Amino acid sequence: MAVVGRFAPSPTGRMHAGNIYAALLSWLIVRSQKGSIVLRIEDLDRERSRPAYANQIMRDFESLGLTWDRGPFFQHNRDEVYRAALERLSSQARVYPCFCTRADLRAASAPHVGERFVYAGTCRNISPDEAERRSKLHSPSWRICVPDKTYRVNDMIQGTFGQNLATECGDFVLRRADGSFAYQLAVVADDFEQGVTCVVRGCDLLSSTPQQRYLQDLLGFERPSYAHIPLLADSSGRRLSKRNRDASFDELIGRYRTPEGIIGHIAHIAGILKTDEPASPDEVLALFDLDRWRQQLGKRHGLAQLEWCEDPVWKAATATGRSKPTEG
Ligand code: GLU
C-alpha cells in the first residue's frame, strides 16, 4: 500500500528549530518509504492562528526543500467534515453535553495520572431536561464516553504504548463550548479523509494516540502507523517553543546562512549526519535509515528528547544585541 505522510503545522508563529526538525523527520521517514506528503494547516485555534504565519510556514518549507504533494488543506473550512464525524460518533457511543467551567474541572480533577488530567465524569449523568435547561444559560462542550479498555499503539520509534481510557484519560472533549471542534476529532477525520497512512510527530502527542485509536475504531477508519519522535529541547530540558521565540527561522538563517546550513545542522543534532555541514533534504535522505536512526537514538540520547545545541558565541552575541558573528 502506498505510504502517505503529512506535515501538520499550527500557524501560530514563525517556525523554530523544533518545527523544522519535526518536518524534516516526517519528510525523511515518509520519503524513505517512497511515500507522498500532504500539507495540512492546523488552524483550529482561531484566536492564535494567523494566515500570515501559514503563508510564511509554506514559504519556509519550500525554501528548505521540504516538499509536499497535496494540499494545503486548512482546518478552518472543514467544519462540515467534523460535524459529520461527530454525528457518526454520537450514533456509536454516548456523546454528552458538559457544563463544567474551568474552575469546576480544576476542583474535580483529583485523579491525576502523572501530569495528565482525568475528567471525573461530572456531567455524564445529567438528565436531558436538566441539560436543556442549562443549555439555555450557556453552551456546553461535548464529551465522548470512553470504555474501561486499554488502547495500544505499536509506535515505530517508541515501541508499544497503551493507555486505559477510563482510568488514564476520562471522557474527552470533541467539541468546545465556543463551537469549535477539538483537536482529537479533527485530526482523526483529516488523517482519514486525506488518506494519511503514516503519522510522524513529536512524542508529546503519543499520549493522545489511544484517544485517536478509539475514535478511528468507532468510525471504522483504517489505522495509520505512528512514529513519535523525540522532542527537541534546550540544555535545561525545556522543549523549544514558538512562544519563547526559540531558535526561530530568521535566527537560524542568520546563523547557518543557507537553508542547507539549517537542514545540515538539524540532521547533525538528530544524529543522522556525522558532521555539521550544509546538506539538502535529498542528501540527508540518501544517508537515512529509520531502524538505524532509532537504534542510535536509544543508545545515545534516549527516545524522549534531543538536545538543541546553541552555538555559545552566537548565543552571547544575539543576547547582547551585538552584530552577528560569521561562521568559520
Ligand atoms: N498541529 C500539531 C503541531 O503543530 C501537530 C498535530 C499532529 O501531528 O497530530 O504540533
Image (cartoon, rainbow, N blue to C red):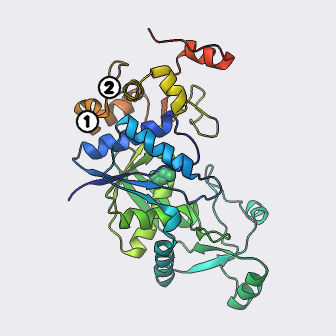
Q: Identify the residue position indicated by label 2 in the image.
A: 279
Decide which of 97, 325 is in the foreground and name it. Answer: 325
Residue 133, percent across and down?
76, 87
In the picture, residue 137 is in which quadrant? bottom right
Is there any visible trace of residue 211 in the rendered image?
no
Badge nearest the viewer, 1 or 2: 2
Relative to 117, residue 96 above or below: below
- 252 lies left or right of 288: right
- Residue 275 drawn above or below residue 126: above
Q: Looking at the rendering, in which quadrant would you find the N terminus?
A: bottom left
Q: Residues within 10 Å of mark 1 (few under 14, many from 20)?
A: some
- Element at label 2: loop
The image position of residue 294, as x and y in percent, is 33, 36
Q: Quadrant of the C terminus?
A: top left
Query: Which residue is tagged 1?
Result: 289
Q: Residue furthest top?
A: 328
- Asked whether, in this view, residue 26 is left or right of residue 244, the answer is left
